[in-house]
Image (cartoon, rainbow, N blue to C red):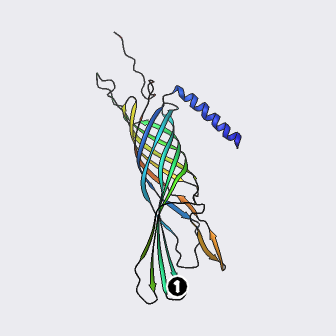
Amino acid sequence: MKSLFKLAILGMGIFFTHQTNAQAFFGVYGGMNTAGLNLDNWKTNTDPGDLKPTFKSIRRLTFGVTCELPLSRYIFFQPELAWTNKGGIMFIDSIYTDITGSGSTTYKTVNNLDLHYVQLPLLMKVRWKLTNPKPIYPNEGSGKPLYFEFYLGPVINFLAIPRSNYSQTSQHTPAGGTPEEETKTVYKDATQGGLKKLDFSLALGGNFKYNLSKKTFIYLDARYSLNFMNINKSALRNEYQKDGKDLISYPTLKNAGNLAITLGISTTFTKRRYWNHPRVNKRRF
């Protein structure tokens, strides 16, 4: 394992050394991210009052920085460093009958999970030129093409801040009577424990990129991420009965596929011309 890690570091060093001869573009982006949670392997309890949790998606902000390195005229490698909010709203409803037979109590629990991730996407991009407008004389830089890019790559996600906004409402109903007034307990802005720190995902998407100048691009991007790992360690516990025994299991909880729409800008700080902008040979008279 150590040899493999050293080999990967050596390979990255050789790669980035080679890229010093090419022109790198640096950028920033920001936008909106839609996220959710998926639950699996939930054991059904013999008690009909214990229901399976349900989830609702959330919308949060996402932003990051990029470094675009050309491998050829149309193929690029783009590592990024991003901050993304994932999570979801969890609903748990339970109904418990009093042992004395005096009635039943209904509990409605709402847990807003805001999971703040630091992301490291490693993307491979392919670029196509959609338009090739001709410059208007005498301004040689007036012809600004429009590009389309498609990309795909793995994403390493580090859970930095797991936050929880928890509330529970209980209501007692006497036997043969009307429901009493609801009682609500709220625990705001608490740290959510029992979640794994590492998650892996696959990102794929595309963008329309406009050549604002010879050294600057602006773009509108749409990205979809598929998440693969179980992030539940002990945060969500499933208590159930089997063959007369009380058992406990920890169900599978995954970040659902999330869609991000962002707007970004990228530029270069070197004097080299970009590979998609060939040097113009001027005639001398």
Residue matched to label 1: 98
For residue 243, which quarter of the picture? Answer: bottom right
Label 1 residue SS: loop
Q: Position of residue 37 (x, y in %)?
A: 50, 60
Camera-nearest residue between 64 and 254? 64
The residue located at (61%, 31%) in the rendering is: 14
Amino acid bearing label 1: Asp
The residue located at (49%, 67%) in the rendering is: 54
The residue located at (63%, 34%) in the rendering is: 11
Camera-nearest residue between 270 and 38? 270
Q: Position of residue 153 (x, y in %)?
A: 54, 44
Please say if 266 is above or below 244: above
Please say if 279 is above or below 99: above
Q: Position of residue 233 (x, y in %)?
A: 60, 60
- Quadrant for the C terminus, please: top left
Please say if 182 is above or below 33: below
Q: Residues within 10 Å of mark 1 (few under 14, many from 20)?
A: some
The residue located at (50%, 42%) in the rendering is: 81
Camera-nearest residue between 165 and 282? 165
Camera-nearest residue between 120 and 150? 120
- Quadrant for the N terminus, please: top right
Q: Position of residue 79 (x, y in %)?
A: 52, 39
Left-right relation of 118 to 139? right
Left-right relation of 16 to 277? right
Please say if 92 is above or below 138: below
